[in-house]
Amino acid sequence: MFATNPYEFRRATLDDLALLKAWRSNPHVLEWWGSGEPYGEAELVDPRVARWIISINERPFAFLQDYTVHGWEDHHFAGLPKGSRGIDQYIGDPEMVGVGHGSAFIGMRMQALFDEGAPVIATDPHPDNERAIAVYKKLGFEPSGPPQETGWGLILPMLATR
């Protein structure tokens, strides 16, 4: 798909809040992420979660977060092996949706997490988010149980291993 790695990942900062808020107001993001404020300073420095802005050719277009699944007592993935990570993301720029960027940059981050020692990567799309589920399956995720209601909403638990 892409001959070389065109993606740059950089940590999200307070300077990105306006961009994240704008992305979250786009209908294709709003449908699955809701309309709340993206993040505050406390969330951006939370050591349990790494939040990333993804760019291509110096054009920011997507957000990704990966997190320790053991950071919350009641997290639905807390039973996974030590070192497992969860991921969530969206393409904020509507012009960049549906052209292969999602599977490419998610796959890159997955490879980095596996290289850093994560035994399992988990994700939890809404069961009706067919586009996201198709991308995750393409990347090697498999459903690990039926849809379930969680503190973060209705999810389809999915897992990937190296």
Image (cartoon, rainbow, N blue to C red):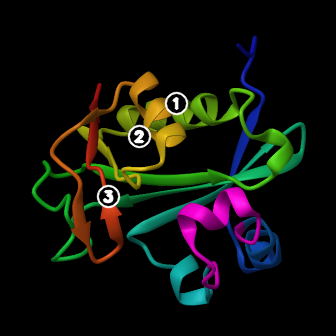
CA gap, disc 3 to disc 1?
Answer: 21 Å
Q: What residue type is labelled 3?
A: Ile
Rendered location of residue 78, percent (x, y): 16, 62
Left or right of 117 on screen, residue 34: right
Measured along the vertical axis of the image, is residue 34 above or below residue 50?
below
Distance (Cα) linking label 2 and label 3: 22 Å
Q: Position of residue 88 (x, y in %)?
A: 48, 55
Give the residue drawn at x 86%, y 43%: 95
Q: Camera-side residue: 32 or 78?
A: 32
Element on which disc 2 rests = helix
Residue 113's disc number: 2
Q: What x and y, as percent, mark residue 125?
A: 41, 52
Which residue does the numbered mark 3 point to in the structure image? 155
Q: Residue furthest right?
A: 58
- Please tell me which of labels 3 and 1 falls first in the chain: 1
Q: Report the amino acid beneath label 1.
A: Gly
- Based on the picture, tell me whether residue 35 belongs to the magenta stretch: yes
- As drawn, the label of residue 107 is 1
Q: Earlier in the sequence, mark 2 or mark 3?
A: 2
Do the CB atoms of the residues marked 2 and 3 lie less than 8 Å apart?
no
